[in-house]
């Protein structure tokens, strides 16, 4: 039985964050995570259920002053179909294509996928590779106040983030990648569809003369939160991407992973997969 | 007592207003409030696709979707495909190709197949396999389903 005492469906951001000022709000968008989590008792509704789908201005994908801004309400289908992203940040389109099923992609929002804070969240890994920040909006001193948090510092534990109860995630922002920037993403599961990643790996950097610089490596489902693997980045930085470097990076990735045994895979298998994927994604990057 | 609210939307071309609990799912509203039992409940968690409907032109799992989010939108269910006297060509093709065995997954399968065929006149077999990933059938295997959809796509070319 739900204890929801208040249902809101605001059209304006200021109305939404004003209503969230006292906390005690469950945010609803696509419902693809909220629905099974509340049905199974994993999560309870707060006093207010707020449907943010109709808030204006949070559904765009825009290039503004060298930065790409994706509104929190953009669906995974919206990311997959975006010509702008296909051109400027194709690793997001690549990840969207591997996300759940057509029906879920049509409903699930980017903001929801991030706030759900699954260690396996499919859109999070490529966004870490793009060094994205999230924009959090709240009502403060009679106006909408925003702050930006690096995605890398957003997650604290499975399902937990630094977002405060009175804050709404309104956008994801990252710098337009350099022309030489190449990134790829790979996830695994026993079948392609509707799979929660057993392991996922994303790697990106500027590829010039066979070597990577400004390297970013992100790994999913191998730790309590999605992870930036800084030591793997250091292993790769500035080096020629030859077999030896790739091998060293793969070994290091396996050492950085602290996976668990669960119903989807053993820790041993996850660590093995991380090594294999790191090698495969680096080869994809090299072949771009 | 759970909180209720009134919503209005278009269902298979008709205007509908209904008062529902705010946490009710669209599938429950269709089946238990509106008596539209064509859309099926199977897994209840978005894994099987039996509950697939169209919302503003795109397919979604109605078991995951909150009914309140239907407010002001356009829904099409399996009941909305046929005309007065004839099955929809996609439904007829599934019948003609023997793609239906127990039939429980079929409303969702046909809704998704129709969506794919309508959105991509050049739908390849690979596109179709990928597009039907979210629809599970435990009886027939999928070969006859693929045949049925391919026949519709080819007939439209």
Image (cartoon, rainbow, N blue to C red):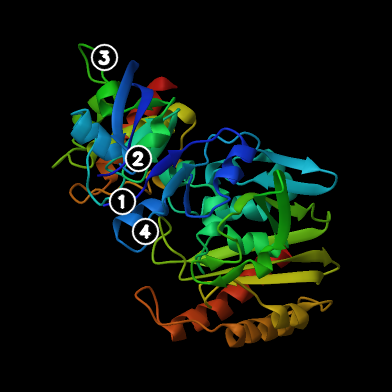
In-front residue for pair B3/A186:
B3
Residue located at (52% from left, 65% from top) = A187
Give the image quarter of residue B75: top left
In-front residue for pair A182/A125:
A125
Question: Residue A80 in the image: x percent, y percent?
Answer: 58, 45
Identify the image quadrant of the C terminus of chain A.
bottom right
- Chain containing the residue with disc 4: A
Q: CA separation, marks 2 and 3?
A: 33 Å
Mark 2 or mark 3, whichever is nearer to me: 2
B51 left or right of A196 in image:
left
Q: Does residue B122 sit above or below A171 in this rendering?
A: above
Question: Residue B127 in the image: x percent, y percent?
Answer: 46, 42
* Mark 4: few/some/many CA within 10 Å (<14, 14-19, 20+): some
Q: Are marks 4 and 2 in contact (CB under 8 Å)?
A: no
Q: CA separation, marks 4 and 3?
A: 43 Å
In-front residue for pair B145/B54:
B54
Q: Which residue is mark 2?
A: B22
Q: Which residue is mark 4?
A: A44
Q: Secondary structure at mark 2?
A: loop
B137 left or right of A106 in image:
left
Question: How many numbered marks does the figure carry?
Answer: 4
Q: Which residue is mark 3?
A: B83
Residue located at (38% from left, 23% from top) = B9
Residue located at (36% from left, 51% from top) = A35
Q: CA separation, marks 1 and 2?
A: 9 Å
Q: Which residue is mark 1?
A: A2
* Mark 2: few/some/many CA within 10 Å (<14, 14-19, 20+): many
Question: Residue A113 in the image: x percent, y percent?
Answer: 52, 55
Mark 4 or mark 3, whichever is nearer to me: 4
- Chain containing the residue with disc 2: B
Q: Are marks 1 and 3 in contact (CB under 8 Å)?
A: no
């Amino acid at each position: 039985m739900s204890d929801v005492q208040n249902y809101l469906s605001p059209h304006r951001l200021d109305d939404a964050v004003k209503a969230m000022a006292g906390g005690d709000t469950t945010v609803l968008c696509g419902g693809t995570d909220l629905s099974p989590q509340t049905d199974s008792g994993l999560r309870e509704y707060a006093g207010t259920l707020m449907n943010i789908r109709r808030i204006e201005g949070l559904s765009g994908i825009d290039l503004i002053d060298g930065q790409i801004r994706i509104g929190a309400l953009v669906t995974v289908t919206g990311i997959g179909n975006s010509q702008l992203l296909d051109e400027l940040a194709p690793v997001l389109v690549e990840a969207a294509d591997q996300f759940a099923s057509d029906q879920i992609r049509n409903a699930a929002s980017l903001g929801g996928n991030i706030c759900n804070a699954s260690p396996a969240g499919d859109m999070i890994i490529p966004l870490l590779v793009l060094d994205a920040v999230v924009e959090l909006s709240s009502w403060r001193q009679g106006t909408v106040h925003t702050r930006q948090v690096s995605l890398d510092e957003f997650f604290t534990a499975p399902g937990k983030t630094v977002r405060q109860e009175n804050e709404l995630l309104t956008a994801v922002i990252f710098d337009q990648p350099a022309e030489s920037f190449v990134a790829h993403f790979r996830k695994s599961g026993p079948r392609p569809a509707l799979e929660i990643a057993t392991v996922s790996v994303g790697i990106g950097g500027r590829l010039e003369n066979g070597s990577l610089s400004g390297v970013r490596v992100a790994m999913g489902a191998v730790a309590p939160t999605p992870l930036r693997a800084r030591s793997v980045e250091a292993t790769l930085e500035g080096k020629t991407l030859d077999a030896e470097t790739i091998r060293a990076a793969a070994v290091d990735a396996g050492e950085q992973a602290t996976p668990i045994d669960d119903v989807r895979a053993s820790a041993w298998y996850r660590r093995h997969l991380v090594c294999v994927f790191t090698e495969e994604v680096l080869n994809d990057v090299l072949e771009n | 007592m759970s909180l209720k609210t009134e919503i209005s939307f278009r269902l298979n071309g008709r205007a509908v207003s209904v008062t529902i609990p705010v946490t009710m799912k669209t599938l429950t509203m269709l089946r238990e409030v509106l008596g539209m039992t064509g859309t099926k409940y199977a897994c209840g968690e978005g894994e099987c696709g039996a509950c697939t409907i169209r919302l503003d032109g795109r397919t979604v799992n109605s078991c995951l979707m909150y009914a309140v989010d239907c407010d002001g939108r356009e829904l099409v269910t399996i009941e909305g495909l046929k005309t007065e006297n004839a099955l929809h060509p996609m439904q007829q093709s599934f019948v003609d190709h023997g793609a239906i065995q127990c039939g429980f997954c079929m409303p969702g399968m046909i809704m998704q197949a129709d969506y794919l065929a309508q959105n991509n006149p050049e739908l390849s077999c690979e596109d179709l396999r990928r597009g039907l990933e979210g629809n599970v059938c435990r009886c027939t295997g999928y070969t006859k389903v693929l045949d049925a959809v391919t026949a519709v796509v080819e007939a439209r070319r």
